[in-house]
Image: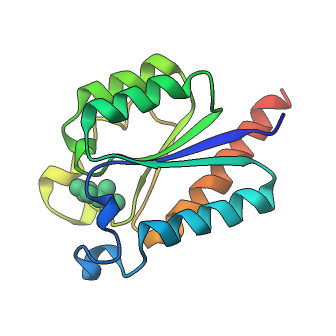
Amino acid sequence: MALSILVLNGPNLNLLGTRQPDVYGATTLEQVEDLCRSEADALSVSLAFEQSNHEGVLVDVIQDAKSKHDGIVFNAGAYTHTSIALADAIASVEIPTLELHVSNVHAREEFRQKSFMSTVVLGQICGLGINGYPLAVRAMAQYLEAQSNH
Ligand code: DQA
């Protein structure tokens, strides 16, 4: 069966395209989903794409991913910097997860430089704009393929 990757987006990412375009660009989340789907098709992996503004819903989606997906690409938005619950959820399901940010969080306000995700993820892609999404899908697919060949 094809590998399955979940691309999960947290709060305010539904506003991509109109939200602070100087920071996050002019591409909408719907267009980001299209980019991810094209990448997944080219790699022959299946893709699920979800967004929620609610921390508990994101916890539920991550818990639910356990039986459905092999890898997660996660832009937790502002919850990156506040949510132990989301970090615990990722650690609990033991699904390889890549942390993603559109902007370079390390070059912004100090509060964005702390990530509760960092200890439970494989790695982080940030600062590449929305191009980070298809790159993360590719990186995750290659990681999972390498793991399954072991
Ligand atoms: C973000 C960066 C976060 O600090 C911010 O709260 C977001 C978006 C990004 O994609 O650059 O909502 O995760």
Picture quarter with ligand 1: bottom left
Q: In the current view of this chain or complex, which residue is farthest to the top?
A: 92
Residue 7: x %, y % from top left: 52, 48
Left or right relative to 146: residue 67: left
Left or right relative to 137: residue 91: left
State whether residue 128 appears in this view: no
Q: Residue at x 25, y 66 (%)?
A: 107
Q: Residue at x 45, y 30 (%)?
A: 62
**Quadrant (top left/top right/bottom left/bottom right) for the C terminus:** top right
Q: In the current view of this chain or complex, which residue is farthest to the left?
A: 110
Left or right relative to 113: residue 96: right
Q: Residue at x 13, y 55 (%)?
A: 110
- Give the number of marks: 0
Q: Nearer the viewer, residue 98 or 38?
A: 38
Q: Residue at x 63, y 43 (%)?
A: 5
Residue 41: x %, y % from top left: 76, 59
Residue 8: x %, y % from top left: 46, 46
* Rendering colour mode: rainbow
Q: Is residue 93 above or below residue 47?
A: above
Q: Is residue 137 above or below residue 29?
A: above
Q: Nearer the viewer, residue 84 or 7?
A: 7
State whether residue 75 appears in this view: yes
Residue 45: x %, y % from top left: 76, 48
**Quadrant (top left/top right/bottom left/bottom right) for the N terminus:** top right
